[in-house]
Image (spheres, rainbow, N blue to C red):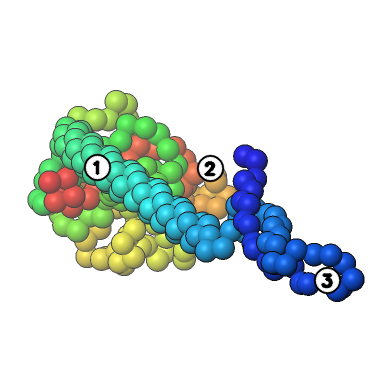
Amino acid sequence: MAEAEVLKNIKSTRARGNTDVATPSTDEPTYCNIHYSKSQRPGSKQPAASNRRSGVTSERVALLLLSVLLAAAVTALGVTLHENTQTKKSLQKLQEEATNLTDETCQRCKNCWEPHGGKLYFFSSVNLTWNESRRQCKSMGGDLVVINSREEQRFLQTRLRGKMEFYEDRFWIGLTDSQKEGEWLWVDNTRLNTSLTFWGDHEPDDWTEEDPDGEDCLRMGEEDLVSWADKSCKSPQKSICEKPEKACG
């Protein structure tokens, strides 16, 4: 936009000149032109308007920034609520799956383990070494059986008669003297009660013909009540596992 110019006439009185020069008897007005740019006009209010515009702009920027922050907070809150909802659903699903798994496991447990006298017994038909058999029992929440009474021995022997497929079928139980020869310990670290033993004839004999290390683990399976015999722990045998009945409630 072109700069406006304002013409201001200023009257001035010409000073009288030399008396030698003929001049009019009255003073003559003289005019001169003084130019102002619009921005330099006296009393101009331009700076004040600029300040107002600057103030309005700052307010708008602050309002815009506040709106952005508010929108971000609302978005973050929405994401958090969504994640919490998904987490809750996931936990519920895991809980349901765990419950179903527990029910299925207990059902299988009841089908495979036989209850007797407050305990559950599992008769494995897989031939494993003594240590492998013990690991198998532990993987199912139990251990190789510990026989604490004549009645328990009778129950086990009766059950084995129906599970022995041929004469040499034998089952590992949780008794060993592998730590010290002749010192028999159950898997629960209790010593063998010598008044409650069921050794077969000439047992234990620690025979070394099959294994130079001798026979340090115990198996049972004879038809008679007296059916214990020591055997090399490396020999594959079937086994009997045991655990509390409440473990599969």
Residue in view at x 62 percent, y 46 percent: 4
Q: Residue at x 41, y 51 (%)?
A: 60
User: What numbered label is drawn on residue 210?
Assistant: 2
Evaluate whether residue 54 shows in this view. Answer: no
Which residue: 24% across, 42% down? 85
Question: Residue furthest toward the left?
Answer: 117
The circle on residue 17 is 3
**Whether label 2 touches label 3, CB < 8 Å:** no
In the drawing, does residue 12 fall left or right of residue 17?
A: left
Quadrant hosting residue 62: bottom left
Q: Amino acid at mark 1?
A: Thr
User: Extreme right residue here?
Assistant: 20
In the depicted structure, whether residue 242 falls above or below residue 236: below
Looking at the image, residue 170 sits to the left or right of residue 99; the answer is right
Residue 225 at x, y percent in the picture = 19, 45
Above or below: residue 212 compared with residue 160: below
**Earlier residue among tags 1 and 3:** 3
Measure the C-alpha gap from mark 2 to mark 3.
Answer: 155 Å
Give the residue type that dot 3 points to.
Gly
How crowded is the residue under tag 3: few (<14 C-alpha within 10 Å), some, or many (20+)?
Answer: few
Q: Which residue is mark 1?
A: 85
Picture quadrant where residue 59 is located: bottom left
